[in-house]
């Protein structure tokens, strides 16, 4: 447990910075529930799958390859199904949607957890900056593709980040989605994370009048494989800071597990969470016009992708 977690307080729901995924799901029986978790092979995704399966849920875990997802599932106690879902590959995402539907299950929650972070050099996927495409467009395709499989009270949980505050001034640079007008690693990552937030907000609006919910979250600052693409000097900072300030993986997975299954989150929609409680996001992340514009632009991007 980090030093900060020992002194940090708890929020209105009794959970806080130092809460773990096991703590926020303690006493719950998830028998009969089916939950999809992307990026299940390591870090927060693996811990989320482990804890939800431990509580009795059937967890459909995705990774870049079916082999990685299946191997990860074999390390946890409970029922898991491993599927491939390479979020930067539209054909892989579509195949994952088809595979989930072929299982004939109803999804009680989708946890959009996977992602890439702060790529040091501009990298493109289908003509778009890789972080924007992977973190936002890939998950957009997956979640909207599985919308019909979501339970009547199903929950969509989108892992964003407080790094959304590093997004460009205009939030989304619609005229620079390919990075051709300039690329700054952390700004591009921030753009992908504010896109995650705007997606969850607009999805929540579309869920209005139903029992379905959509929320975004900041998991905390955790040293996981997400940092694998960063500048090596940043990795040194992580190594030094980790014992003192960074959340552990069980602490980092707490907020997404809380939103996916805790009764306290039932009916809560369109919010941004941090440390298992509602938090403030950047002002323009609450802009419904920006959220709708991003949704429409993303639909256009997806429609133009190869079959």
Image (cartoon, rainbow, N blue to C red):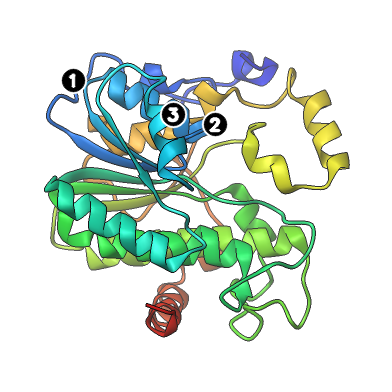
Q: Give the x, y percent position of residue 133.
A: 54, 67
Q: Give the x, y percent position of residue 153.
A: 15, 47
Q: Give the x, y percent position of residue 293.
A: 44, 81
Q: Is residue 232 visible?
A: yes
Q: Is residue 181 left or right of residue 197?
A: right
Q: Nearer the viewer, residue 197 or 180?
A: 180
Q: Quadrant of residue 244?
A: top right
* Disc 1, SS: loop
Q: Quadrant of the N terminus?
A: top right
Q: Quadrant of residue 220?
A: top right
What residue is pinned by disc 1?
Answer: 29
Q: Is residue 241 left or right of residue 262?
A: right
Can you say whether 105 is above or below 138 in the image?
above
Marks 3/2: CA–CA distance: 11 Å
Marks 1/3: CA–CA distance: 22 Å
* Disc 2, SS: helix
Residue at horizontal 36 percent and vertical 50 percent from the top: 215
| Front tag of 1 and 3 | 3
Marks 2/1: CA–CA distance: 24 Å
Q: Quadrant of residue 52?
A: top left
Label 1 close to label 3 by CB (< 8 Å): no
User: Around disc 1, counting alpha carbons within 10 Å, would you say few (fewer than 14), some (14 to 19), or many (20 or more)?
Assistant: some
What residue is pinned by disc 2?
Answer: 43
Can you say whether 284 is above or below 82 in the image?
below
Going from the N terminus, do you reach mark 3 or mark 2 first? Answer: 2
| Front tag of 2 and 1 | 2
Residue at horizontal 63 percent and vertical 36 percent from the top: 225
Q: Nearer the viewer, residue 215 or 58?
A: 58
Q: Give the x, y percent position of residue 249.
A: 55, 25
What residue is pinned by disc 3?
Answer: 72
User: Around disc 3, counting alpha carbons within 10 Å, would you say few (fewer than 14), some (14 to 19), or many (20 or more)?
Assistant: many
Q: Quadrant of the C terminus?
A: bottom left
């Amino acid at each position: 447990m980090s030093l900060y977690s020992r002194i940090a307080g708890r929020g209105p729901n009794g959970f806080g910075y130092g809460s773990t995924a096991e703590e926020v799901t303690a006493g719950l029986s998830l028998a009969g529930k089916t939950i999809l978790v992307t990026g299940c092979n390591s870090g927060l995704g693996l811990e989320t799958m482990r804890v939800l399966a431990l509580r009795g849920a059937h967890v459909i875990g995705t990774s870049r390859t079916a082999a990685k997802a299946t191997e990860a599932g074999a390390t946890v106690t409970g029922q898991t199904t491993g599927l491939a879902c390479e979020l930067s590959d539209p054909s892989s995402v579509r195949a994952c949607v088809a595979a989930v539907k072929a299982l004939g299950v109803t999804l009680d929650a989708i946890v959009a957890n996977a992602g890439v972070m702060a790529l040091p050099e501009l990298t493109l996927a289908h003509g778009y900056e890789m972080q924007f495409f992977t973190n936002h467009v890939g998950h957009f395709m997956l979640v909207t593709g599985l919308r019909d499989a979501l339970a009547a009270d199903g929950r969509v949980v989108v892992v964003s980040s407080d790094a959304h505050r590093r997004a460009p001034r205009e939030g989304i640079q619609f005229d620079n989605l390919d990075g051709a007008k300039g690329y700054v690693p952390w700004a591009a990552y921030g753009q992908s994370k504010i896109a995650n937030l705007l997606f969850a907000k607009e999805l929540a609006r579309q869920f209005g009048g139903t029992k379905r919910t959509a929320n975004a979250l900041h998991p905390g600052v955790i040293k996981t494989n997400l940092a694998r693409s960063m500048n090596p000097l940043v990795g040194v900072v992580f190594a030094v800071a980790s014992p003192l300030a960074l959340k552990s993986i069980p602490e980092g997975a707490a907020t997404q597990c809380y939103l996916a299954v805790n009764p306290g989150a039932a009916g809560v929609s369109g919010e941004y969470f941090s440390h298992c409680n509602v938090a403030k996001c950047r002002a323009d992340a609450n802009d419904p016009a920006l959220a709708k514009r991003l949704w429409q632009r993303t639909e256009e991007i997806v429609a133009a992708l190869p079959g």
